[in-house]
Image (tube, rainbow, N blue to C red):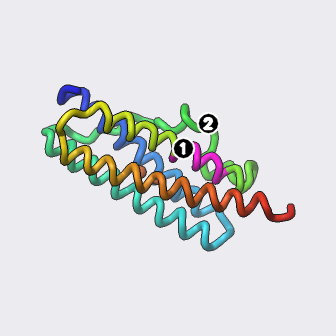
Amino acid sequence: MDKNQIIARLNWFYTLELNQVDLYITQSKKVADQYTRKVLERSAQIEEQHALNISAKLKELGAKPTLLGDVLGPLTGKIGGHVIPLVGLKNMLKANVMLEQKAMADYKKFISSLKGEKGLVDLLWTHLIDEDLHASWFESKAKELEMEPQ
Ligand SMILES: [Fe+2]
Ligand SMILES: [Fe+2]
């Protein structure tokens, strides 16, 4: 990957991370369960840190962090916070799992397309593992809700 391709990719992840911040904050305001609300708030903070890390990398490369618009919509359809009352908490969590898994797949692809770039690769790994931890929590909570009598 040349420098311009890396910058384009970083801007895509920058947008993804900030879209996730918005999504999790919106969801946290709609969720009645306190623990889930706290997890969403904390997840939003972590995604925000990811966006800041990527923004710092872009600046290091002499590029300006640029928002590319809504990159979540095409991936997830309507899982914005406003539809939680319609889809229910369990389905919202399942949609979040899909989203985190998509982010993980894209981070993995990005990592394997880089040669050298050790600092960047190390950073992308930390994001990848954070997304994995988010996905695991969302998934186990969704499973717990599945076991509960409706
Ligand atoms: Fe993230
Ligand atoms: Fe995440």
Query: In the rendering, at what x and y percent does residue 109 appear?
Result: 38, 34
Q: Residues within 10 Å of mark 1 (few under 14, many from 20)?
A: many
Q: Which residues are magenta?
A: 92-100
Q: Quadrant of residue 142?
A: bottom right
Is 42 on the left-hand or right-hand side of 121?
right
Q: Residue furthest right?
A: 150
Mark 1 to mark 2 CA distance (whole Å): 11 Å
Q: Quadrant of residue 37?
A: bottom right
Is 88 on the left-hand or right-hand side of 150?
left
Give the answer, above or below, for where 93 lies relative to 113.
below
Q: Quadrant of the N terminus?
A: top left
Check disc 1 and report the residue beneath it. 99
**Residue 77 numbered mark, or none:** 2
Q: Is residue 45 magenta?
A: no
At label 1, the amino acid type is Leu
Query: In the rendering, at what x and y percent does residue 20 appear?
Result: 47, 49
Q: Quadrant of the C terminus?
A: bottom right
Q: Which residue is depicted at the point 42% across and 35% down?
A: 69
Is 43 on the left-hand or right-hand side of 80?
left
**Residue 54 numbered mark, or none:** none
Q: Which residue is depicted at the point 61% across and 52% down?
A: 81
